[in-house]
Image (cartoon, rainbow, N blue to C red):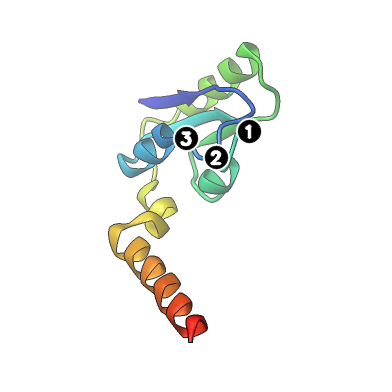
Amino acid sequence: MAVIWRDTLHEGSPTVVKEALACNLAIVSTAVGDVRFRIADVEGCAVCEENSPAAVARELEVVLRNPERIDGRRAIQDLSEEMLFAKLLNVYRSALTHAT
């Protein structure tokens, strides 16, 4: 199974891509938002260089030849609840330090 993401050029960080990575599902996407960054090191995913149905179809054909699940969770470890909490806590600590 693969998730196909094709959207406008104005998407920042598609939730569906992060959800697919969490489920270890392959992704075929256009180069929108942070998708290229998110799947850069994930074998079995693809970013289309052009935003066209034909380009998406070509990449999808390649990705679907691999029946194995990808290792997508590794690509979103920085979005775990623990990591996000630690980052937020550091922001508050920094604000308190600079407020005095």
Q: Can you identify the residue that label 1 sits on?
A: 31
Please give the count of numbered marks on the rendered protein.
Answer: 3
Amino acid type for the residue under numbered disc 2? Val
Q: Residue 59 placed where, x, y %?
A: 58, 24
Q: Can you identify the residue that label 3 sits on?
A: 14
Question: Do the residues bearing badges 2 and 1 touch, measured as CB atoms within 8 Å?
Answer: yes
Viewer can see residue 53: yes
Question: Do the residues bearing badges 2 and 3 touch, measured as CB atoms within 8 Å?
Answer: yes
Q: Residues within 10 Å of mark 3 (few under 14, many from 20)?
A: some
Residue reaching furthest to the top: 53
Label 2 to label 1: alpha-carbon separation = 6 Å
Q: Residue at x 30, y 39 (%)?
A: 23
Callout 2: SS:
helix
Viewer can see residue 69: no
Q: Is residue 100 left or right of residue 72?
A: right
Amino acid type for the residue under numbered disc 3? Pro
Q: Is residue 30 left or right of residue 45?
A: right
Mark 2 or mark 3: name the one nearer the start of the chain.
3
Q: Can you identify the residue that label 2 sits on?
A: 35
Q: Residue 52 placed where, x, y %?
A: 66, 15
Q: Residue 39 placed where, x, y %?
A: 52, 44
Q: Residue at x 41, y 78 (%)?
A: 93
Label 2 to label 3: alpha-carbon separation = 7 Å
Residue reaching furthest to the front: 100
Amino acid type for the residue under numbered disc 1? Ala
